[in-house]
Image: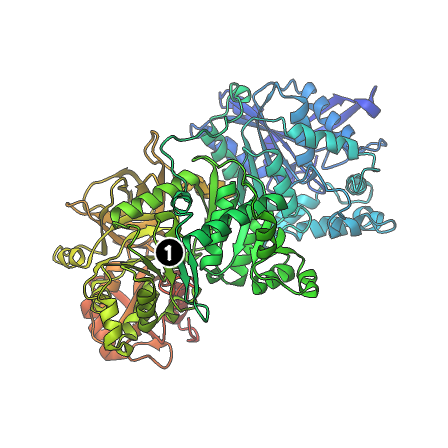
Amino acid sequence: MPPVPGLDERFRRVIEVPGVRADTGRRRSWHHLDTGPVLADLGLEPVGTILAVHGNPTWSFHWRRIAAESVRRAERGGPAWRLVAVDQLEMGFSERTDVPRTLAQRVADLGAFTDALALTGPVVTLGHDWGGVISLGWAVDHPDLVAGIITLNTAVHHPEGVPIPAPLRLAGVRGVLAASTVRTTAFLETTLGLAEARLPREVRDGYRAPYRSAARRRGIGQFVADIPVDHRHPSHAELTRIADGVRMLTVPALILWGPRDPVFQQRYLDDLIDRVPHAEVHRFEGAGHLVGEDRPCAEAVLDWLDRAGLDAETSRRPPRSPASADADFEPMWRRLDERADDTSIAAIDMTQDPPLTVGWRQLHERVTALAAGLTRLGVRHGDRVSLLVRPGPTLTAVVYACLRIGAVVVVADAGLGVNGLSRAVRGASPRFLIGETAALTAARTLGWPGTKISVDRLPRVTAAALGVSCSLADLAATGAGGKAPDEPVADDVAAILFTSGSTGPAKGVVYTHGQLAALRNVLAAHFDVAAESGLVTGFAPFALLGPALGTRSVTPDMDVSAPRTLTATAVSAAVATADARIVFLSPAAILNVVDTAGDLTAADREVLARVTTFLSTGAPIGADLLAAAQRVFPHAAPHTPYGMTECLLVTDITLDGIRRAADAEEPGVCVGAPIDGVTVGVSALDAEGRATGPVADTAGVLGEIVVSAPHLKTRYDRLALTDAEAVRDTPGGDARWHRTGDVGHLDARGRLWVEGRLPHVLVTEGGPLAPVAGEQQAERVDGVRRAALVGVGPHGLRRAVIVVETTDRARRAGLADPDLTARVRAAVVSPLAAVLVVPELPTDIRHNSKIDRSRLSEWADLVCAGGRITAP
């Protein structure tokens, strides 16, 4: 065998295997990788075997990284997993034969190979592309040996009547098949081109090594020809057998997926999840068909094996038992049911002209009718329903209708932008999508999944063009007088709420009904929300909580996707209309409310004086802005709670609390003490800026903030690796924990101080440096409105740069003038490489308040390196 660059020759083996089925009576030569002998030389006994099967047109070279990494980990004292990675017959450096190899033949071939190898359990199968199908077929046939299954982009079922993906259709066309797969290297080169970035030359040469001649490429053409395009294909029956058998596999499962795959598209992932609902799933955003080349899948697989603790007993574990009812659980719609005959106001939407007012009885009837209508349409327990509806009474009614029937609401707002919203909707794979006309148009254009339901009744031509099946009015009419199914229980999944995407791709956060109810309970208790409190909700996530809290709510006149559009007069009008005592606003909304307070009349100010509680939610704000807001709400207790989509309430602090904390001279923003039921700890940063310390409440230690609470999310949706990192090295027991990605410290009084985000920590010569303290110091300088501290230079030698947004808006970005530079340098304790100025600091779309430090850091690096100065 010729050596292959990048492939450890110690792993390469050839074995003679007796043929089966059409090959009976012959012996075939199989090339494969096997780390077992290397482990034996190291004196290590394998804990199990990973049986890896490549697809088309790859070969065992595809698994070189996991072979090497598994041995490295074993050498360092980790579990010794033996990797056996085959070259299927006709492929790689295995034998070329004169026998056509159907799917059934290949599954049988693999069984013959493992028999010849005398493979014993526990075995974890690992497959990619059509190797995924074949490996799963082997698992179905060897349940006594299988302890786990892992797949990378593959498919076990193709819906009848739906064309196979275009690249495969083209490759399989008569006359094109041989030319693209055998006579030329077109199919091979096209596959290598599906990597996210161009593969290094040595990697491409490694994949090409066994396929240098047309004779060596015959198997590539055979694989394409064997794709079961419909029920008439010879391999269709075997594919169906495997697809059905996969449903019976209850062993731990992992699915790693590259969403940008033109062949194995999202529908194939959805089908796998449906067949293996207990599988852990991780979608690598941006990765494609060759996800194993695009992302560190070797590490992901081995880390998962460590977490799963797979052993011989694992394969005999029973499937998860269904969720049971919680006697103390009160669902989100309970207050709505209690006020079913109440004619008083429940919700007001002032974004409409004239404002839309809905009573409790009307809202209850609407929710009940929609719940029954959705059920009759075919929405079932656990079905995902994407809601692309502006906050207001309509969205409220739809959310509660979905919750009532056990459907899972998927909420990703327009603040994510078109690309972010599209990623979120596609990744969640809803079965149904409810939207306004603009959202439905985007769904049609961008191919978002799900049966389409329109908020408004549309003309027939428009509805047909947008693929709309019905409207909400239609659902309510068909559901009038109908009954909803049995209520979901506390442990059932209720919602997937997407994060802002301000520090990377937006993540879907999974909440159960019990966790949403816990959030409602903690809000009601902590802020003393009563039936007559009334809420003004200028922050979209809280607009849905009014019915759950049993109090009326009003959405003020604003563009809810752009918080900065909210004015002081609009808040006054909302408070007056709902006779509200509590106001929820985002930091960006507060900024504009304060800026427009001069437009308030005496009557407006009298109305705002009725407010007793004022909350800034979404991001902590400083004392000056909170004090300015209190002048707008003179009799309100101003709160600025700290939380995130994963746990919406963690700590709370009032303006008085912030002022008392100012005397402490601690770095960062004080966000107060944990609220009842919440535990906060800190995982200390090491010299490399990594949060590696144990979770503790030691005062004064800079580290990642880690929280636990009854209303903390269950997990991230289809982001198993991200979820694993979020709970890494957290305390055991029954409590759920979450690494927030924020950095900060606790003080001697148990108050939490937030100092920035973990990715924004600068690793300098003197150790880790969090950004917020320097930003606060810079913002005390006259003429500085906001500041961001970012790093330039190499990791470990980063230097701090302050980027400021001035009160008198700068005309262009660049170096700050000498006077401002000197005053900022004098105010900031940390040494600064430069002081830069911009007309406006870039922020996230959703909150308009979280400064994009990563973007600023890249820009500052260019500026400080002498590059052309442009806007960041």
Question: Which residue position is annotated with label 1?
Answer: 344
- Label 1 CA crowd tier, 10 Å (few <14, some 14–19, many 20+): few
Compared to residue 293, the image places residue 94 above or below, namely: above
Q: Residue at the spot x=71%, y=51% of the render?
A: 189
Question: In the rendered image, which quarter is residue 755 located in?
Answer: bottom left
Q: Residue at the spot x=75%, y=47% of the render?
A: 164
Name the image quarter holding the N terminus: top right
Compared to residue 96, the image places residue 185 above or below, namely: below
Q: Residue at the spot x=29%, y=80% of the render?
A: 808
Q: Position of residue 555 (x, y in %)?
A: 39, 62
Compared to residue 147, the image places residue 589 above or below, namely: below
Farthest right residue in view: 175
In this view of the protein, which residue sits in the foreground, 786 or 653? 653
Q: Position of residue 115 (x, y in %)?
A: 69, 19
Question: In the rendered image, which quarter is residue 140 located in?
Answer: top right
Question: In the rendered image, which quarter is residue 709 located in?
Answer: top left
Q: Position of residue 341 (x, y in %)?
A: 41, 48
Name the image quarter holding the C terminus: bottom left
| In this rendering, position of residue 214 left or right of residue 599 | right
Numbered disc total: 1
Q: Is residue 198 visible?
A: no
In this view of the protein, which residue sits in the foreground, 74 or 750? 750
Q: Residue at the spot x=26%, y=66% of the render?
A: 832
Badge 1 amino acid? Ser
Q: How is the image coloured?
A: rainbow
Callout 1 secondary element: loop
Q: Position of residue 394 (x, y in %)?
A: 49, 57
In this view of the protein, which residue sits in the foreground, 176 or 258? 258
In this view of the protein, which residue sits in the foreground, 781 or 187? 781
| In this rendering, position of residue 632 left or right of residue 162 | left
